[in-house]
Amino acid sequence: MKDIQVKKLIEAEKKRQKKVINLIASENYVSKDVLEALGSELTNKYAEGYAGKRYYGGNEIVDKIEQLCVDRALKLFNLDPNEWHVNVQPLSGSPANLAVFTALVPRGGVMQKDGTTSITGKIMGMALDQGGHLTHGQKVSATGKFWQQIPYGLDQTTETINYDQLRELAMKEKPTIIVSGYTAYPRIIDWKRMREVADAAESIMMVDMSHIAGLVAGGVYPSPFDYADVVTTTTHKTLRGPRAALIFVKRDARELNKKIDKAVFPGLQGGPHVNQIAAVAVALKEAATPAFRKYAIQVVKNAKVLVDELEKRGWRLISGGTDSHLILVDTWNDGKKREPLVVTSATKAEAGAGAITGKEASDRLEKHGIIVNKNAIPFDKRLPADPSGIRLGTAAETTRGRKEKDFKAIAKKIDEILRK
Ligand SMILES: Cc1ncc(COP(=O)(O)O)c(C=O)c1O
């Protein structure tokens, strides 16, 4: 690279990535092949439209790339192309979710001929502080500005989804769409029960499997495809691909797939990033290998070791542990109190001995080369900028070959740093 300034910065970031222990639950390290596809000449090409129906010439090769990506995406999750459609063009997870809602959830505020105002469609999604993602209808996201969010949450005792409560709320609100699949939820989601709730409320069942896609592909987390109408996923978390997203849509008489394709292009995007689509195709092939299955198994094993080792040292883990790659640690509580804290004046005295806020914990760990993110815990009484916990994930370090003994050492180090 001739641009020395950028080259130096890339080299510095490469070095930083090598040096740290990366426990960010949403990150991973892609293969050289994925990087090669991303940095290829495909980035030069405009390809507005879909395979065989482009608005630009010169797309015969791009068509093959997009089709290959589609075929591999369906194959990876054992989907019959006659039953499932997949759009591989979303630039990332947030635009993918926005595309689904744009396609399927009515927007209101429009004066009707009879003088009434049309109803805004409702998105039922988990509240941010309970583990949901911004794009599941939170106010600060476009999804919460254009539509009404019906937030649902967890059971305060178990810190897991209370499906009976969820059903009650869904029956009362009758949302257009119910979203499951989260950003900070360590446990297995009962897709069958989600389907029952969606059926009872006559809602569309959408799953955002961004966090767990690699675990589903690797067969260590239940697949949502037997139940969902729509499944979105980022490709860059446990799936270990480039930054991008996929939208899978069940084919039926409602033809939701056609609406979603139109919402992606021309609704929200212009030319697809063909280099990115090729890189996704590469990652999907990698994820179909026995080596990837072994990787997914190890990711969960490592997370369970991290849970056991932290718990042994007195740390309270949200929901008592994990079934996935993701762990939420209540650092403010430190395991001395199991009841949710009512922190009125946010003094340390009210928290457990040795308590530390999520921000303090994350800053302190970073100083010692362990990268995590501060995170709200369910029913958090502290503010999001300085919440009560941290989120950990094992996907990235497992890619680097770390096993159970390494995670035992990591847990010990975390404990020592946080208790200093
Ligand atoms: C569940 C979920 N959905 C969507 C997204 C958004 O993805 P992106 O950052 O690619 O827009 C995230 C990101 O963390 C996520 O956790």
Image (cartoon, rainbow, N blue to C red):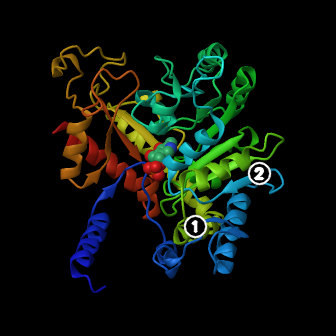
Label 2 environment density (alpha carbons within 10 Å; few <14, some 14–19, many ≥20): some
Residue, x 77% and y 54% (percent of image)?
79
Q: Is residue 210 visible?
A: yes
Q: Amino acid at mark 1?
A: Ile
- Circle count: 2
Alpha-carbon span between mark 2 and mark 1 = 19 Å
**Residue bearing mark 1:** 277
Compared with 85, 163 (above or below) is: above
Give coordinates of residue 311: x percent, y percent: 38, 34
Q: Amino acid at mark 2?
A: Trp
In the rendered image, which quarter is residue 283 located in?
Answer: bottom right
User: Which residue is at 32% across, 57% downward?
Assistant: 21
Q: Work out whether residue 53 or residue 149 is closer to the camera in this orientation and state it.
A: 53
Q: What residue do we see at 54% from left, 39% from top?
A: 323
Is 227 placed above or below 8 here? above
- Dividing the picture into quarters, in which one does residue 418 lie? top left
Label 1: few (<14), some (14–19) or many (≥20) C-alpha neighbours in 10 Å: many
The residue that mark 2 highlights is 84
Mark 1 lies within 8 Å of ligand 1 (Cβ measured) = no
Is residue 219 something that shows in the picture?
no
Secondary structure beneath label 1: helix
Nearer-N-terminus badge (2/1): 2
Q: Picture coordinates of residue 243 (x, y %)?
A: 47, 60
* Quarter in which the C terminus is drawn: top left
Kindly check if marks 2 and 1 are in contact, taking CB atoms under 8 A apart as contact: no
Q: Quadrant of the N terminus?
A: bottom left
Q: Position of residue 41 (x, y in %)?
A: 50, 81
Horizontal side of 109 relative to 176 (left or right) equals: left
